[in-house]
Amino acid sequence: MSTLRINSSEAYSDRKYYILITIGFFLVTTYVSFFHHDFWTIFDQDGLIYLSGGQQIIAGVGENVSFPNAGPAGPVLFALLESVLKDGLIAIKIVSILSGTGIVFFSYMVFKNIFSSKIALVGQLFIAFNPWIGILSISSVNDLFPIFMSIFSLYFITKKDIKLTDIIFSGAILGIGFMFRAQPAIFLLAIITFLILLRKKPKFKISAVALLIVFFVLCCSPM
């Protein structure tokens, strides 16, 4: 009985810590972004290009608009948020901050699916203190959201008992992320390789790979 109580206490403590790390990352990046980096810089030029292109698409004059290594979803999302907030810089920063926070949160979930909760906490701390994640989270760029979606998709794939519904969610999430940038395609190939090597019956492997690709294509087809 005492062992059960200790295990329950440790599990609660781990849950508390990973939530605190996530909240701490969100608060720090929000503070730095809006109080110490509240202006366009040379590193935010991509954000300006995406915002301008998204505004043209929404206005119906985006026939000749193209984005290098990126889909139209990010620019359109930025333009829609800008139309509500009336500030393009804040609109893009909100997406960056929430994406970075999502990466920190789901990095713990993915690590926990693979390792123990203790190792997951250490892994989450490495992600939270990664300088590139921090810099991109306070910048007006289009890079973090597709990475967040890719990490989110791994949460379903790394479950101990993968079901076909998990495969569907993973493929759909990667497809949505691909409409922002091309990084999710790399995760798609990695997941396909993982599914092929998975210790499951061949019928499950074939169904899983097929569903992953189909839902990936369906969700990125609006491009």
Image (cartoon, helix red, strand yellow):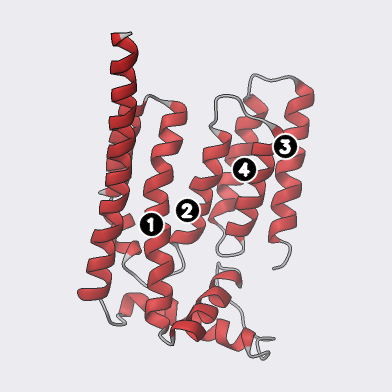
Instruction: Using residue 3 as the reference point, say whether residue 112 is left or right of it.
Output: right
Q: Identify whether 48 is placed above or below 184.
A: below
Measure the alpha-carbon separation of dots 1 and 3.
Answer: 29 Å
The residue at 66%/51% (across/down) is 172
Q: Which amino acid does label 4 sit on?
A: Leu
The residue at 48%/54% (across/down) is 147
Q: Which amino acid does label 2 sit on?
A: Phe
Which class describes the residues within 10 Å of circle 3: few (<14), some (14-19), or many (20+)?
A: many
Instruction: Using residue 89 as the reference point, say whether residue 206 is left or right of it.
Output: right
Mark 4: secondary structure: helix
Name the residue that disc number 2 marks: 148
Name the residue that disc number 1 marks: 100
Q: Residue 209 carries which label?
A: 3
Q: What residue type is labelled 3?
A: Val
- N-term mark: 2 or 1: 1
Name the residue that disc number 4 marks: 189
Question: Circles 2 and 1: CB distance less than 8 Å?
Answer: yes
Measure the alpha-carbon separation of dots 2 and 3.
Answer: 22 Å
- N-term mark: 2 or 3: 2
The residue at 71%/34% (across/down) is 164
